[in-house]
Amino acid sequence: MSDRVRLADVMPASTAPDPPRAHVCVLASLNFPDISAADVALIRRFTRVALATLHAQGASWELWDTTVALAEPARAGDYDGLLLLGGGDIDGSCYGVSTRHPSAYGVDVRADRDALAAIAAAEAAGRPIFGICRGSQLLNVARGGTIIGDIVDYTLHHGAPGEPEFVDEPIDVVAGTRLAAILGARRVTGRSGHHQAVDRVGDGLVVAARALDGIVEAVEDPQRWYLGVQWHPEDDDGPDADRAALFAAFVDAAERARHARLAAAAAGE
């Protein structure tokens, strides 16, 4: 069907390096309830770019699509890193809200629960975790944080009805954060199309970037590689250098985790 995203639609032309620097788990919601034709096109393009960028940075990957229930989400801890891509809104029950916001879109609580279980497993295993848009919000919710149900003054964050959904958004990066070290800039331009964002920041997390109106645009854990960005670096209409820097830093961390895992396994033999 043309209104669904198939696995073949998101496969990049590139191939995995041999041998790879790291092997990562990529979690994506390729389809979700009431998905629009516009979102189908975006997910196809964004996912393909993300997977190709992992290849370009020397990583191989396995794609988990939460359109269907994950058989063993705890297996996310067996990989060298976990990347969470965008998708629908998170069900409010995951962060203590019992009534669904009237602007909520694409909600699938089963997919949310599977993603949170995968995050818990990867974190318990000490793996680096990188979340984009919905993925960033999931990282915050996994730490007990909450989400703004709908950004009322949205002009910085997405287009108006009848206009292109995605906009170029100025984003201020907080000095001294991991994100600042990765991007090497105090202000970047992100490709944004979000109506929700982090509200209360989760336990152990700090704000790593904000929009000009103060909305949280990135969170991170200062003590470990656990980073979420609200904008879409995998939008190839955005800056190539920022996308490369973020994915390179994630793959570097995954490679370190791989070496640590192999060294621990060798020591235990």
Image: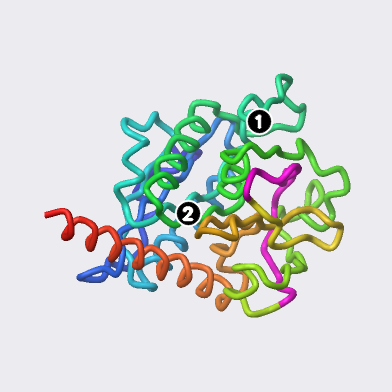
Please give the range of residues in magenta. Answer: 186-204
Instruction: Bin the neighbour count of mark 1 within 10 Å (Cα to Cα): few under 14, some 14-19, many 20 and up.
Output: some
Q: Residue at x 39, y 65 (%)?
A: 54
- Tell me the residue that label 2 is attached to: 129
Relative image position of residue 183 (x, y in whole percent): 61, 75
Q: Position of residue 87 (x, y in %)?
A: 56, 43
**Looking at the image, is mark 2 or mark 1 earlier in the sequence?**
1
At 78% from the left and 48% from the top, the residue drawn is: 162
Picture layout, residue 190 above or below residue 94: below
- Quadrant (top left, top right, bottom left, bottom right) of the C terminus: bottom left
Residue farthest toward the top in the current orientation of the protein: 98
Q: Residue 233, relative to residue 154: is it above or below?
A: below
Which residue is rendered at x = 22% and y = 61% of the image? Answer: 262
Query: Where is residue 16, by image quadrant?
Result: bottom left
Q: Position of residue 72 (x, y in %)?
A: 32, 33
Q: Is residue 138 above or below residue 228?
A: above
In reply to whether residue 239 is colored magenta, the answer given is no
Q: Secondary structure at mark 2?
A: strand
Quarter of the image with the N terminus in it: top left
Indicate the position of residue 242 as horizontal and vertical percent values.
58, 74
SS for callout 1:
helix
Which amino acid type is shown beneath numbered disc 1? Tyr
Seen from the viewer's position, the closer of residues 36 and 24 is 24
Which numbered circle lies on residue 141? Answer: none
Is residue 50 rendered to the left or right of residue 155?
Answer: left
Q: Which residue is the site of mark 1?
A: 95
The Cα atoms of the two marked residues, 2 and 1, are separated by 20 Å
Q: Quadrant of residue 172?
A: bottom right
**Label 2 sits on what residue type?**
Ile
Residue 191 covered by magenta stretch = yes
